[in-house]
Image (cartoon, rainbow, N blue to C red):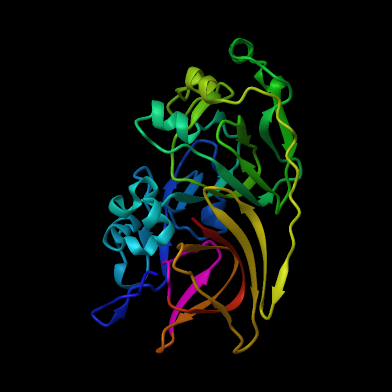
């Protein structure tokens, strides 16, 4: 059991808001600024890395006594915030490097993303200097009427046929395209050829990795007239080239309690994700707490409200788009408002 400690009379295991890093990839739009009030000076704003200790896009603490520090700096100082799972298993040496095992993003795909593949842990550790692979989950926040995503292949293929299809521009005939709508979810296991389609707004939960191998990018050029790099041989080495079954939406069961409903979206070896709907009235609150096994992250995908904690009723106000880190073995929280969250555990 990890005991809470007090420093200068302040309880360590209190929640805090995070401020993301942004990415201006060429396929992005402006919805994250317009609808989620990110206020990041990028156009397009393709992604915001909401909860990240990855050096390619760290997030920063935006409230409380750690305000202005990176989340990595906080976790280096207080590794117990990760919980006993990380402490006991030393996930990616989390306890010394300040690294979370997961990474959370918002993604605004105004245009199609490249056709790509992420490596497995084993491949990445062998060929990418011991890095982590990348399995990811997509939760669809919004989708255009005709939006689609690419998930695997329609038929079995081999590397030679795939190279030929890329060179002559017929690769899209090999790809399985799946319609998407708001509230859908997809688990994209490492090795799966995939792409997010235009008109899709997504929350992504993934392993803490930025390894992406592009197979095909529609011969696009960036603002400087250059085509983006492809990584065809690495992608073919890491990809599953067998036919993929069309992904089916899993059975989801809402469980109700006073002021709140919740459902399990995804549970895999890397993360567990629930959707929580909070709807409280007047002085009614929902009680919430992270146990000593794992931290929890609340990603507010709609609504607003207040999280209160401590004897002095400290208040943390949250709004649509906010990301809140809750250390393992946290103080008991009281949530009031009307909001929808993704509740993520490592």
Name the spot of residue 141 as percent of width and height, x first. Answer: 65, 54
Residue 311 versus residue 228: which sits nearer the camera?
Answer: 311
Query: Residue at the location (56% across, 21% down)?
Result: 219
Q: Is residue 283 left or right of residue 144?
A: left
Query: Residue at the location (47% across, 79% down)?
Result: 332
Q: Is residue 315 magenta?
A: yes
Query: Residue at the location (60% across, 49% down)?
Result: 202
Name the spot of residue 27 as percent of width and height, x first. Answer: 55, 37
In the displayed structure, 236 sits above or below 340; it is above
Q: Is residue 245 left or right of residue 117?
A: right
Q: Quadrant of residue 340?
A: bottom right
Query: Residue at the location (76% across, 45% down)?
Result: 145
Q: In the image, which residues are magenta?
A: 314-330
> For the view shown, which residue lies furthest in the left direction?
8
Residue 50 versus residue 246: which sits nearer the camera?
Answer: 246
In the displayed structure, 295 sits above or below 22; it is below
In the displayed structure, 125 sits above or below 84; it is above
Q: Is residue 156 magenta?
A: no
């Amino acid at each position: 059991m990890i005991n809470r400690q007090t420093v200068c009379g302040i309880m360590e295991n209190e929640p805090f808001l995070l401020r993301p890093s942004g990415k201006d990839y060429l396929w992005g739009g402006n919805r994250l600024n317009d609808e989620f009030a990110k206020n990041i000076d990028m156009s397009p704003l393709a992604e915001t890395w909401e909860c990240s200790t990855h050096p390619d896009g760290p997030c920063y603490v935006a409230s409380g006594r750690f305000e202005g520090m990176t989340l990595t700096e906080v976790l280096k100082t207080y590794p117990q915030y990760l919980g006993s799972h990380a402490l006991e298993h030393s996930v990616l040496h989390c306890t010394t490097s300040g690294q979370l095992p997961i990474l959370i993003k918002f993604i605004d795909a105004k245009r199609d993303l490249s056709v790509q593949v992420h490596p497995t842990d084993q491949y990445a550790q062998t060929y990418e200097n011991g890095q982590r692979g990348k399995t990811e989950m997509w939760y669809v926040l919004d989708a255009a009427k005709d939006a689609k995503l690419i998930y695997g292949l329609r038929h079995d293929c081999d590397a030679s046929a795939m190279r030929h299809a890329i060179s002559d521009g017929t690769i899209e005939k090999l790809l399985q395209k799946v319609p998407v709508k708001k509230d859908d979810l997809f688990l994209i296991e490492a090795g799966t050829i995939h792409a997010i389609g235009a008109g899709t707004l997504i929350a992504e939960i993934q392993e803490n990795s930025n390894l992406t191998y592009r197979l095909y990018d529609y011969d696009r050029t960036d603002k400087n007239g250059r085509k983006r790099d492809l990584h065809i041989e690495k992608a073919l080495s890491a990809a599953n080239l067998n036919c993929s079954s069309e992904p089916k939406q899993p059975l989801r069961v809402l469980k109700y309690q006073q002021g709140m409903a919740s459902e399990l979206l995804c549970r895999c070896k890397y993360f567990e994700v629930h959707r929580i709907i909070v709807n409280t009235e007047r002085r009614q609150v929902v009680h919430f707490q992270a146990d000593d096994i794992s931290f929890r992250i609340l990603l507010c995908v709609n609504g607003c409200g207040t999280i209160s904690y401590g004897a002095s009723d400290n208040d943390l106000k949250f709004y649509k788009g906010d990301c809140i880190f809750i250390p393992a073995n946290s103080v008991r929280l009281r949530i009031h408002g009307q909001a929808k969250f993704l509740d993520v555990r490592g």
